[in-house]
Amino acid sequence: MTKSEVDAMEETASTGVVARIDDLVAARRNGAAITCVPSFEINEVDFTHMDNEFEAILFFCRFSGTVDGQEYSFRKCYARGCPKNLCPHVSQAVMIANRYLQKDYRKLKEAGIDVETRLFSLEDMVVRFRDFKEEHGQTLTIEDYIHVAQEGNDVSMEVSVEYLPAVENFGNRKERRTFFVANFDVTTLGATHQCQRCLACYATDKEAEEKPRQLRIANDRLDRLFKEFDLAGIRFNMRFFT
């Protein structure tokens, strides 16, 4: 990552604008009084990838509250699921989303921020997939592979990044959005698996206004993952969004 990108990230963090979990943590460590209430958004999205169209369900958590009395609200995408197996299965995505969400809850609570630990509910949201876990076994996340490497096993990752255009359906309206997606082809313990992380997104019609900041956020999240890979001894190729 270039110095200008790092400087831009630091500038974003210092402006006081809350757009991610790390902004809340930084504000609390600087002594701010913070309230935080999570709520869920489950949206159907029509994606296009290499001229192939497919339907998916995105699992968002919206974090709302106040920082020293000033209101904020932002949302984070935790997983993407596809009913037709063109990406992780819907019920698999629920489990992935909850694991990443619990990690963010721990980060908030360790910083001294009180937050209700609500989770995505498979029964409430996608009842017809409730038996998936028993049929397909445990779902591994990027963090699981980091632990595998920390235990002394050989782990390698082929990393690629892509912009995925999509149309997000909000009931009575549709909105074109572009998602920053990182793909991780993980080879370990004699097998290769693919993990995906949605790192940020922006309204396609507001690209000039929203893309630069979301680009910095996506690359910041990648940079943190790569540092964890280095510490765990994982072999990987470094890729950033441009």
Image (cartoon, rainbow, N blue to C red):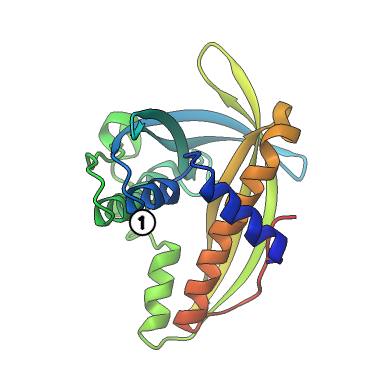
- Residue ID at (53%, 40%): 84
Residue 225 point in image, percent of width and height: 51, 66
Direction bottom: furthest residue = 152
Q: Depth check: 11 or 75 in front?
A: 11
Q: Please tell me in which quadrant of the rendered image residue 136 appears.
A: bottom left
- Location of residue 230 with respect to 216 vertically, above or below: below
- Residue ID at (63%, 51%): 216
Amino acid residing under circle 1: His
Residue 152 point in image, percent of width and height: 39, 88
Tell me if 99 is positioned left or right of 191 in this view: left
Q: Which residue is mark 1?
A: 136
Q: Please tell me in which quadrant of the rendered image residue 5 appears.
A: bottom right
Tally the numbered discs: 1
Residue 198 point in image, percent of width and height: 55, 48
- Residue ID at (25%, 57%): 110
Q: Quadrant of the C terminus?
A: bottom right
Q: Residues within 10 Å of mark 1 (few under 14, many from 20)?
A: few
Residue 145 point in image, percent of width and height: 43, 72
Q: Depth check: 35 or 173 in front?
A: 35
- Location of residue 126 with respect to 179 vertically, above or below: above
Secondary structure of the residue carrying numbered label 1? helix
Tell me if 34 is positioned left or right of 221 in this view: left
Tell me if 62 is positioned left or right of 10 in this view: left
Q: Quadrant of the N terminus?
A: bottom right
- Whether residue 169 is visible here, answered yes or no, is yes
- Whether residue 87 is visible here, answered yes or no, is no
